[in-house]
Image (spheres, rainbow, N blue to C red):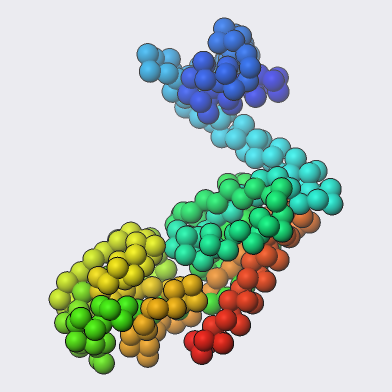
């Protein structure tokens, strides 16, 4: 198959429109259409269903698009490795992690990374879904469990525990902090929505707390929202313990019921082992975690 025709087909399938693909490729709509028709003729198959709202891939088109997507990602990986052969750290690094860790811990620390590497551009993808690193859905992942894929370089960074927190203002206006789990019945509980994707120990902790029938409930589908509820004096929140350094006014509640440790891993594809962009990000995160642990120790929270 002609590589140029495959490239044009991929652009059309990705855009869902001849016009949009032509704009991206700097080709006229008629030129793009001719190349797609020529590819269909050479394959003896129809690749698109055409209708007024755009183009939809046929079953055969889906098969070919899967192949061209894999090819595109491998080419991107090769280009990244070529760029990484230079001494300078620059270009785009796609980092994926959970919404909570990304918003509450990682993003606030990124200014330091940009100060050190002003030509590095971070594309931060916050998803509970685990992206496929070998298929280059992302370059680096920070996840709350050890990656299962064998062809990844992985580094254990830290451990996280889920704990209960509130503000002094809330506690003062609600008779003080509960001294036992039974005391939860007199307070509003703020937690992740039970159905939301989250670390298993967090979900188990919430389920256990629910048996004590809190007087009121606020559920949010991410920890950023839970934190905002707690900071605005709405109730007692279930939060990861890494928030305590950046939000020192949070008061820990019933600290003896903290959950088991949750391991946090950094992982990236084996083919990026020598990537200078990945190395710069990895070293930055490790240095920040060392500083984070020193600060917690200083605060007497470690």
Q: Give percent across and percent down for residue 53.
A: 38, 18
- Decide if residue 257 is in sight here: no
Residue at point 27% right, 72% down? Answer: 233
Residue at point 39% right, 62% down? Answer: 224
| Picture quadrant of residue 226 | bottom left
Q: Give percent across and percent down for residue 96.
A: 55, 55
Give the left or right position of residue 143, taking residue 256 as reference: right
Give the left or right position of residue 212, taking residue 153 as reference: left
- Decide if residue 19 is in sight here: yes
Residue at point 53% right, 59% down? Answer: 107
Q: Give percent across and percent down for residue 157.
A: 61, 72
- Quadrant location of the N terminus? top right
User: In the rendered image of this protein, does residue 2 appear above or below residue 77?
Assistant: above
User: In the rendered image of this protein, does residue 142 appear above or below residue 249?
Assistant: above
| Picture quadrant of residue 3 | top right
Give 82 or 189, whichever is nearer the viewer: 189
């Amino acid at each position: 198959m002609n590589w140029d025709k495959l490239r044009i087909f991929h652009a059309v399938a990705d855009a869902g429109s001849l016009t949009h693909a032509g704009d991206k490729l700097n080709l006229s709509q008629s030129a793009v259409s001719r190349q797609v028709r020529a590819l269909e003729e050479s394959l003896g198959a129809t690749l698109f269903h055409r209708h007024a709202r755009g183009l939809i891939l046929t079953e055969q088109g889906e098969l070919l698009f899967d192949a061209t997507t894999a090819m595109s990602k491998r080419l991107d990986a090769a280009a990244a490795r070529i760029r990484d052969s230079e001494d300078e750290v620059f270009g785009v690094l796609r980092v994926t992690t959970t919404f909570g860790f990304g918003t509450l811990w990682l993003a606030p620390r990124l200014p330091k990374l940009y100060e050190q590497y002003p030509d590095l551009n971070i594309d931060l993808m916050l998803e509970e879904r685990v992206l496929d690193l070998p298929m280059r859905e992302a370059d680096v992942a920070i996840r709350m469990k050890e990656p299962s894929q064998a062809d990844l370089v992985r580094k254990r960074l830290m451990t996280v525990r889920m704990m209960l927190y509130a503000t002094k203002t809330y506690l003062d206006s609600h008779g003080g902090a509960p001294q036992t789990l039974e005391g939860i019945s007199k307070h509003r509980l703020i937690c992740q929505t039970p159905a939301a994707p989250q670390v298993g120990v967090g979900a188990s902790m919430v389920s256990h707390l629910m048996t004590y029938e809190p007087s009121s409930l606020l559920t949010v589908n991410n920890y950023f929202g839970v934190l905002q509820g707690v900071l605005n004096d709405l109730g007692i929140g279930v939060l990861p313990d890494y928030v305590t350094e950046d939000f020192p006014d949070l008061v820990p509640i019933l600290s003896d019921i903290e959950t088991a440790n949750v391991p946090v891993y950094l992982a990236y594809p084996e083919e990026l082992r020598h990537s200078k962009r990945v190395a710069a990000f990895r070293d930055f995160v490790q240095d920040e975690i060392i500083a984070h642990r020193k600060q917690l120790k200083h605060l007497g929270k470690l």
